[in-house]
Amino acid sequence: ALQRDQTVSYPDFNVISGGQLNPNGHTLTIDTDYTQTPGSNYQGLYMLSSESEVIFNGDASFQGSALLYLNGGTFRFRGDLEVSSGDDYRPGTNFLSTFEGSTPQAVTFYRASTNDSRFGDLTIANPAGVTFGSVTGANDFVAYDVTIADGGVLRTSELYALSSLTLDGSGRIEGVGGARTTVLDSSNDVTMNGTSSIYASTMHVRQGLTMASGAELDASVVRLYNELIEPEGTYIVPRTEVAGTIALQRDQTVSYPDFNVISGGQLNPNGHTLTIDT
């Protein structure tokens, strides 16, 4: 357990089976590549305090199949992250993983899903881009609060934000290799600030969507579940669908190019006036 902030630059730094490394409310900076191979649960990096922080200036490799104790604090990745087991990276909901490199970063999970490797809170702050991919199974990358910082670029085939999704400044979400993100799903509000942008195939908006005038949403389909959105930015969406139960709270005018209430959807004017311009 650390007793002060420390920086280490061991050429080959490993926490092996039986070892535990606890920042203990301090900042640990690792200037080289880092590997851990826990032999049982709660070995390796032990993150308990919300003040604990680990900065990985090299690549980080989480190996083995043991559960980690990642309930408080922050990991700041400036190199690649590799997770070799579906069990090896399951932070708590308030544990923050930040990707803040200056060259392209890759995140490789063996399996990515709610029940396998996933994130707690997630921030993307790398202008050169962070690319998510999995070795086996679906690329169902899951996090809670997701923030794409000003200038940050996330490239992923699928992303599920179990809480909010916020894009600041010129932050961007797109698919791998510049394609569209296949599925982008946010359980709570989506906020697109500044000149942020999204390039997706299907986007699920389960609460509200707020867009700044300079923001751009380019998606093949947007599905609405809780309210009709009135985007102020550039809305390049050829088809907008009501997929949940929506009851208006005020008079609204919408001008979606192709407006549909699909199977399972319900749209209730709720005593208000709904004007559909398309």
Image (cartoon, helix red, strand yellow):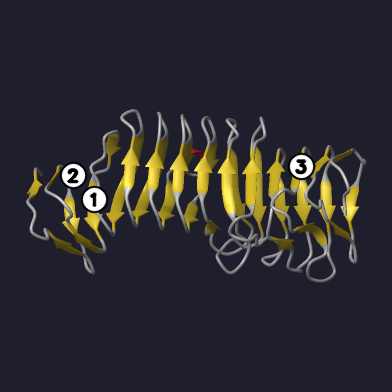
Q: Position of residue 151 (x, y in %)?
A: 53, 30
Q: Where does residue 207 sit, x and y in percent of width and height? A: 33, 55
Which residue is rendered at x = 68% and y = 48% of the image?
74
Kindly state the secondary structure of the residue where label 3 is placed: strand
Q: Is 92 on the left-hand or right-hand side of 17? A: left
As drawn, is 55 to the left or to the right of 245? Answer: right
| Disc 3: which residue | 56
Residue 206, quarter of picture: bottom left
Mark 2: amino acid: Tyr
Q: What residue sits 73% from the left and 68% below the top?
A: 67
The answer to whether mark 2 and mark 3 are in CB contact below 8 A is no
Which amino acid type is shown beneath numbered disc 1?
Thr
The residue nearer to you, when weighing 27 against 223, is: 27
Question: Do callouts 1 and 2 mark residues in contact (Cβ within 8 Å)?
Answer: yes
Residue at the spot 52% in from the left edge and 59% down from the top edge: 140
Q: Earlier in the sequence, mark 2 or mark 3?
A: 3
Q: Amino acid at mark 3?
A: Phe
Q: Earlier in the sequence, mark 1 or mark 3?
A: 3
> To which residue does mark 1 refer?
240
- Asked if one can make out residue 83 in the rendered structure from this viewpoint, the answer is yes
Left or right? Give the position of 124 relative to 56.
Answer: left
Please indicate, yes or no, whether residue 176 appears anywhere in the rendered image. Answer: no
Residue 256 shows which numbered tag? 2
